[in-house]
Amino acid sequence: MTDQVTRGAYIHIPFCDHICYYCDFNKVFMKNQPVDGYLDALAKEMAYYAAMGPVKTIYIGGGTPTALNEEQFERMLSDVSHYFGHDALQEFTVEANPENLSGGKLELMKRYGVNRLSVGVQSFDNELLRTIGRAHNAENARDTIQRAQAAGFENITLDLMFALPGQTEEMLHQSLETALSLNTPHISIYSLQIEPRTIFYNRMKGGKLRLPGEDIEADMYGQIIFTLEKHGLRQYEISNFSRSGYQGIHNSLYWHNEEYYGIGAGAHGYVNGKRYANAGPVKKYISLVGKHGFSEASAHAVTVQERIEEEMFLGLRLMRGVSQSRFLQKFGRHIKEVYGNQINRLKSEGLLEECGDYIKLSTKGIFLGNNVFEAFLLS
Amino acid sequence: MSERSDSRQSHIRNFSIIAHIDHGKSTLADRILEATQALTKREMKEQTLDAMDLERERGITIKLNAVELTYKAPDGETYIFHLIDTPGHVDFSYEVSRSLAACEGALLVVDAAQGVEAQTLANVFLALENNLEIIPVINKIDLPNADPDRVKKEIEDVIGLDASDAVLASAKTGIGTEDILKQIIDRIPAPTGDPDAPLRALIFDSLYDAYRGVVVYVRIIDGTVRVGDTIKLMATGKTFEVIEVGVSTPKIETRDALSVGDVGFLTASIKSVHDTRVGDTITYAERPAAEPLPGYRKMNPMVYCGLYPIDTARYDDLREALGRLELNDAALQYEPETSEALGFGFRCGFLGLLHMDIVQERLEREFNIDLIATAPSVIYKVKLTDGSTVDVGNPSEMPERKYLEEVSEPYVKATIMTPNDYVGTIMELCQRKRGDFKNMEYLDDNRTNIIYDLPLSEIMYDFFDSLKSSTKGYASLDYEMDGYRVSDLVKMDILLNGEKVDALSVIVHKEFAYDRGKAIVEKLKELIPRQQFEVPIQAAIGLKIISRSTIKALRKNVLAKCYGGDVSRKRKLLEKQKEGKKRMKAVGSVDVPQEAFMAVFRMSHDD
C-alpha cells in the first residue's frame, strides 16, 4: 500500500503563549482562546481528509504545538494518530519550543508514534533571542535537546535563523558551533525576512531596525554552508542540511510538487490538483468546520502551466535539482522544449548547471536563487 | 436684424472663472450649473466641468470647456449664460488668454484665507488686457481662518479693483450663489458684435472625436454661422463645409446656427486639430472678414523629452498613441528618435512640464504603454565655430566642445509673490538657480513681488516645489518667456559599466558641473539595483571623468525562509519581482529602472 501513498498531512496549531517579533504565520495568543473547541474541529477536519486516503508523513506545526497543556496535547496526538497513524507511516514530526517541551509531552509523543522533533532554537545567543522576542534562552534550548535525545528522540532538527538585527558573523559562528555540538542529524537555517504585520516590520518602518544588509547576509550564508557541510551535514535544500538518510520527508513533498492535506486554521493544502487555504481566524475556522466538515476559505485549481512552473521553482530549491526524465513523465513534454531559452541563458550566466538527468543550481545560483526561480514563470 | 434676436443678444452673458488652483473654481461652476438647473443634483457628479479623470485627480483643468445655461432671473427675464472654463496653469497661459478673449466678463475667485496668488494675478491681468468686467468673489468664507476684509483690501491694493461689492461666498455650501448670478446680469455687458457682418468666430479650443472629426469650440464675435456654410480658417487658410453646430448645456444640443455672442461648437469633417489652432479666426470662405481677430499666436513647445517604450516591441503602439493624443492636443509635437541606450522612441515637445507629465500619464494610463522618459530639456541655441547655428533639444546631440562658439539658453521673467518674511529665502533660492535679480515691489504691508530673470532649465523641474516648501506654501509663481542668453554650458555624460548612456546626458552650467555630477552618480547608485556583476557609474565632461561610484554586485537574493506549504506566497513574491524587472530598461548589460532617467534631471537641478 505504501508505494501508492504519496501525500502528507500538515496540521496547524495556531496557539502561542508568546509572539515572536518576526513571525507572520497564522497565530494567536492562547489566553482566552477556545482551545478545546478548536481541537474538536481539528478532529472533525482530520476525519474529512483521512477519508480521502492515507498519508506517508505527518507534520504538526504552528503557532506552537507544545503550547497546548499536556491534556490537550495528548488529546490532539491521539486524534492525529487515530486518523492518520498506521504502521507504514514514514515520518511523524512535531514542532517543539524549548520553553514548553515538558518531559510529559516528550513521553506522550513517544507513545503516539512521533518519530521526529523540530526544535525552534533560532539562536544560541541570549541577547539575540531577546532581540527577536523568543521566550527561551540558550541554556533551555541545549537542555531541551539533550532531554529529548535522552528520551529516545534521535531524529531531531534544529531551526536556526541568520541575518538577525545586531547579529555578527562571530555570533552566528558561535550558534553554529553549539548546534553542531548537540549532534542532531538535521539543521534548518532561515534568513530573517521582514514581513508585513510583524513587530519587526513596524520597527523597520519606524527606522528602528538595523539589519546586517545584503553583503553580510551573503557572507553569513556562505559561512553556514561551509561549516555545516564540513561537519557532515549536507545541504540538500536552500535552507536545509542533514546527515545522509535524515532529509525531511514531509518538507520534501513540497519541493517535489506532491500533494498534502492542510488541516487546521490558516493551513495550506494541495489535494486533487487544487491548492487551498483554510480560514485563519480560530472562531471562523471552528464555525466553517462545524458547517462543512472542512474549513477551506480560498482555493485555486492549478493549471498545467502553473504546475510546470511550480515543478521548477520548487524543485530547484533542492540541491539535486529537477529531473528531466521525471519532468517528461509528469508533463509529457521535454523540459528543454518548455524552458530551453531560460535554461541556456541561466547556464551562460553561471546560475544553472546540468548534471546528468538533473538541472540544478550552481553555487552562484544557490545565492541568487530568486533570479533563477523567476525565470521559470512563463507569463 | 429682427427684434427677437436683438433681444436674445442683449440677454447673453459670457464669462469665465479665474481662480488659483484649489480656490474653488470647479465647485463654484457646479453651483452655477445647479442654480440654472442645467443638471439636477442627481445628475451632477462633483465638478462636472473637469471631464477627464486626470483633471479631477490633479484638481486642474486641462481641456477647456464651455456650457450654455439658461437662467430665469428673479426680475422675470430669461438670460443665456455661457460659462467658459479656463485651464489653471502657467503652461497653458496662451489658451487662457484666448478663452478670456471669448468673454465679456470674469468671476475672480479668491480664497478667503489665502488671498491673491501670483497665478491669479497673472490671469486677472490677462482678463484686464481683454477688457473684461471683473466680479470679485471671496470664496470659502465659512472656513475658520477666513479673513474677507483682508482679502478685499488685497484685491484693491494688489490688483486695483474696487472690491466693495465683492460677493462673499462659499461655493461648497452655496452661500452667495444668487448674488453672483445677479452681478453677472447687472455688471457683465451683453455682446456687441454685428450679426450681419462677415463671420468672425474665435477658436478657443478644439478636441478630436472619432466619429465627427475635430470639434471646434468657438465664440461668435460677428456674423452668423449655419450648417452648410463654407468656412475658412484665417491662419491656416483651409476651408471646410460646416456639418453641425451646437452648444453644450452641458448635454450636447445641435442648433441651426450660432450668432453673435454665442459660444458653442462646430464640426466640419476636419481631420486634425492642427488645422484649427487656438486663437485663429473662422470666417466665410466666400465673403471673408477683412481682418482676423487679434491675438493669434502659434504655440511652440518649450520643453522636449524623449519617450521610449520599455518594451521595444511596443514602438508602433506608442506611435499610434501619440497620434491619437495629437488629434486632441495641438501643442504636442513629436518625431521619431533613436537612442543607443533606449532604442527607438520619439522626441516630444511640450508647452511645459505639466503638459509633459499629463501626456506621459495619459500614454501610460489610457494606452497602457510603460515608458521611459528621458530628462526634459529646453531648446539650446548653439552657434558653431563655422558660423552656423543649430537648435539642440536633446542633450546627447550637443556638438563637441571644440566646435562650439557659444551656447544660449532660454530665460524666463519670473514673478514671485510672497509674504515679506520669505524674501530672503526666495532670493537665496533664485541665486542658487542662477537667477538674475531684476526688481522688488512692496505690494502692501506684508506682501512683496520679487522679479528675477531665471534660466528656464532651472525652473523647469522642482523650482516650484522648492519655492513652495521653503515658504510653507505661501509664495506663488508666474513666469513668461524672456528670450535667449549666452551661458557657460557643458554637456555631461553618464557612463554605466564603461558605456556612455546617451539618454542620461544632461546639459549643466560649468560652475555646477562637479557637484551635480557627484550628486547624479550617487543618486544612480541608489536607484539602480545590484546586478550580477559590479557596475561602475561615472560622470564625464568630454573625456574627463569628474565623478565616479560603483554599484556592488548582487550577492544574495534567495529566499531562505520557511513558507510551509504556502506555495502561492512564493509564487506571488516571484511574480512581483518579475513585474519589477519588466519596468526596467536593459541598457547594455545593465537593468536600469524608469526613475533613474528622471532622477538625473532632478539631481542636476538640486543642490
Image (cartoon, coloured by chain):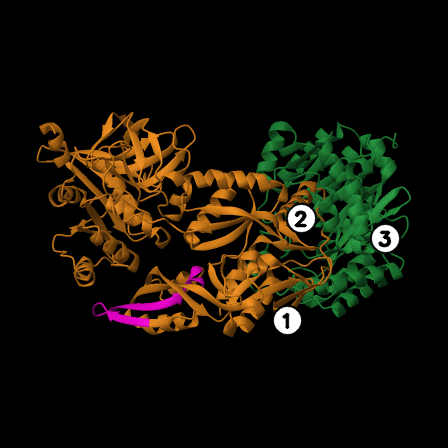
The percent coordinates of residue B388 (x first, y second) are 50, 62
**Dominant secondary structure, magenta:** strand
The letter of the green chain is A
Say what amino acid the circle numbered 3 marks. Ser
Q: In the rendered structure, are the residues bearing label 3 and label 1 in contact, judged by CB atoms less than 8 Å apart?
A: no
Between label 2 and label 1, give the one nearer the viewer: 1
Q: Which residue is mark 3?
A: A242
| Mark 3–mark 1 distance (CA, rounded to whole Å) | 52 Å
Q: Which mark is residue B545?
A: 1
Foreground label between 2 and 3: 3
Q: Is residue A254 magenta?
A: no
Q: Which residue is mark 2?
A: A63
Q: Color used for chain B?
A: orange
Q: Position of residue B537 (x, y in %)?
A: 65, 65
The answer to whether residue A6 is left or right of residue B199 is right
SS at circle 2: loop
| Earlier sequence position, callout 2 versus callout 3 | 2
| Image quadrant occupied by the N terminus of chain A | top right
Q: Answer yes or no: is residue B9 visible.
A: yes
Q: Which one is in front, A376 or B498? A: B498
Q: Secondary structure at mark 3?
A: strand
Q: In front: B189, or B580?
A: B189
Q: Nearer the viewer, residue A254 or B172?
A: B172
Q: Chain of mark 1?
A: B
The image shows residue B356 at horizontal and vertical percentages of: 45, 50
- Amino acid residing under circle 2: Gly
Tag 2 near tag 1, CB within 8 Å: no
Whole-angstrom CA distance, mark 2 to mark 3, is 24 Å
Tags 3 and 1 on a common chain = no
Q: Helix, strand or loop at disc 1?
A: strand
